[in-house]
């Protein structure tokens, strides 16, 4: 049986549930979004600044050409290594580089490739002639491409660093939360109070720690009241029951009363009451207290034989068929098996017709009868607490108690029944061989 702390710690350690992983993923996603937006913004800003700067240069040069050409003619054309200008008649566009021929008459600035170079080109009309001014930006474009590559690489580096950095930040930030989770996982009702508020007062989780302290105080009070009630109930119920059973034994010494119907009913009711009290008190115990008794074992075949012998006075005309039982050691206390098998056998004797068969083979306990069986509706609710059906129904606790005990010890239970075909219950006590 796992301790609560180990279950909580294992859950915290699962990647899909780890708060540290989620914080790291959120931080990495945030960095990725911010880095992407910054790269896009820098690209846009660079493009805008470059466009405005180049447009300003070509516009300035074109204005000078437009002012000087009417007076100087072709001598006004710039002779710089980075600036090329053309002034041609409208019908002489074929003499221009092919990419320039389709440009509109008034273009403020656009990038054009010709002669294996990249130019920023602006156009205008001077004295009816078409004027083209091209500014060589090949080197600028190369530096811009390098800038973009460096910027993208820097963004990837930042994103790669965001994961380990995010894990480190998450580990440091969540350390108080993990410590609080571990302490809460180690808390057990009834243990000496371990206040958490003082330990985590300096952290934001101090509010949660104080809330847990208040909750554990109330829970400890509840557990103490429950334990006191269980102890008192155990004493107050068992004492009068022992008196009743002692009185029955004395009365049964009188031959006139020993086999009488009232005495039989009283003895049966007293036995059922004793078994019910034992079952309820057994289930009321704190499961965590059973850790120290996890090594408890019993011989299932012997316990079943003893229970059958105890119930023989209740069998009446019912024929019990019980072939040789396989030796079977069960990892559970005797009382657990007595509660389960006692309730199953009593139900079979009460509702199971004239024949009941009990077998124990390969760790599988089977109780079958040839009674009236159960409907599909009864099967669905058979293990519900307080469910009763049919004549002679009891308190509706028998199969409910069986299911509770079976679940506690991991015994798989299977119920099969059909109207007028009887009922069969199988209980897997140990893995089949």
Image: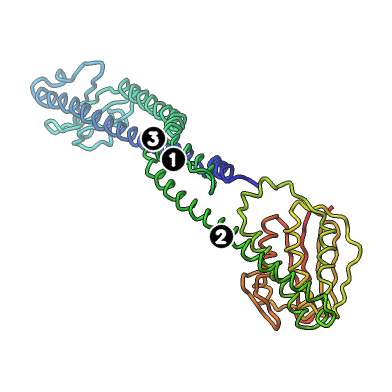
**Residue shown at the point (74%, 53%) measured from the top left:** 332
- Which numbered disc, 3 or 1, marks the residue that appears first in the sequence? 3
CA gap between label 3 and label 1 equals 35 Å
Q: Is residue 211 above or below residue 146?
A: below
Q: How busy is the neighbourhood of tag 1: few (under 14 within 10 Å), some, or many (20 plus)?
A: some
- Which numbered disc, 3 or 2, marks the residue that appears first in the sequence? 3
Q: How busy is the neighbourhood of tag 3: few (under 14 within 10 Å), some, or many (20 plus)?
A: many
Q: Badge 3 is on which residue? A: 31
CA gap between label 1 and label 2 equals 29 Å
Q: State the SS at label 3.
A: helix
Left or right side of 367 for 77: left
Answer with the quarter of the image where residue 255 lies: bottom right
Q: State the SS at label 2.
A: helix
Q: Position of residue 374 (x, y in %)?
A: 72, 78
Q: Is residue 411 above or below residue 18?
A: below
User: Are discs 3 and 2 less than 8 Å apart at CB?
Assistant: no
**Residue shown at the point (22%, 34%) measured from the top left:** 91
Name the residue nearer the viewer: 196 or 232. Answer: 232
CA gap between label 3 and label 2 equals 58 Å
Q: Position of residue 130 (x, y in %)?
A: 19, 32
Residue 16 visible in the displayed image: no
User: Are discs 1 and 2 less than 8 Å apart at CB?
Assistant: no
**Residue shown at the point (77%, 79%) measured from the top left:** 263
Q: Badge 2 is on which residue? A: 229
**Residue shown at the point (70%, 83%) measured from the top left:** 391
Q: Is residue 124 above or below residue 240?
A: above
Q: Position of residue 345 (x, y in %)?
A: 78, 70
Name the residue nearer the viewer: 372 or 54. Answer: 372
Q: Badge 1 is on which residue? A: 196
Q: Is residue 351 above or below residue 246?
A: below
């Amino acid at each position: 049986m796992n301790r609560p702390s180990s279950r909580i710690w294992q859950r915290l350690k699962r990647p899909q549930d780890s708060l540290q992983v989620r914080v790291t993923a959120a931080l990495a996603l945030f960095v990725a979004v911010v880095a992407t937006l910054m790269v896009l913004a820098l690209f846009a800003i660079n493009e805008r600044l470059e466009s405005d700067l180049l447009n300003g240069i070509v516009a300035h040069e074109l204005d000078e050409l437009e002012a000087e050409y009417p007076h100087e003619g072709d001598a006004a054309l710039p002779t710089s290594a980075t600036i090329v200008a053309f002034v041609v008649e409208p019908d002489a566009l074929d003499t221009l580089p092919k990419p320039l021929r389709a440009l509109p008459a008034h273009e403020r600035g656009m990038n054009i490739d010709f002669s294996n170079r990249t130019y920023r080109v602006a156009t205008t009309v001077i004295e009816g002639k078409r004027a083209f001014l091209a500014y060589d930006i090949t080197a600028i474009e190369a530096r811009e491409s390098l800038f973009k590559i460096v910027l993208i690489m820097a963004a990837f580096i930042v994103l790669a660093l965001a994961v380990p950095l995010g894990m480190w930040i998450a580990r440091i930030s969540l350390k108080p939360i993990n410590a609080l989770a571990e302490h809460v996982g180690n808390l057990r009702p009834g243990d000496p109070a371990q206040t958490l508020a003082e330990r985590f007062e300096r952290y934001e989780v101090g509010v949660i720690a104080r809330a847990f302290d208040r909750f554990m105080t109330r829970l400890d009070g509840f557990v103490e009241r429950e334990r006191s009630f269980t102890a008192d109930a155990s004493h107050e119920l068992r004492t009068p029951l022992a008196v009743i059973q002692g009185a029955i034994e004395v009365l049964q010494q009188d031959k006139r009363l020993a086999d009488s119907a009232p005495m039989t009913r009283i003895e049966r009711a007293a036995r059922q009451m004793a078994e019910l009290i034992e079952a309820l008190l057994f289930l009321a115990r704190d499961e965590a207290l059973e850790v120290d008794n996890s090594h408890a074992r019993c011989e299932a075949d012997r316990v079943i034989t003893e229970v059958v012998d105890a119930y023989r006075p209740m069998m009446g005309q019912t024929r019990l068929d019980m072939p040789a039982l396989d030796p079977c050691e069960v990892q559970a206390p005797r009382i657990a098996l007595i509660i389960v098998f006692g309730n199953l056998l009593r139900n079979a004797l009460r509702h199971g017709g004239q024949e009941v068969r009990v077998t124990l083979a390969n760790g599988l306990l089977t109780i079958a009868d040839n009674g009236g069986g159960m409907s599909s509706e009864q099967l669905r609710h058979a293990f519900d607490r307080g469910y009763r059906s049919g004549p002679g129904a009891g308190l509706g606790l028998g199969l409910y108690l069986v299911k509770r005990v079976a679940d506690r010890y991991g015994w798989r239970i299977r119920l099969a029944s059909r109207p007028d075909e009887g009922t069969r219950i199988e209980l897997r006590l140990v893995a089949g061989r």
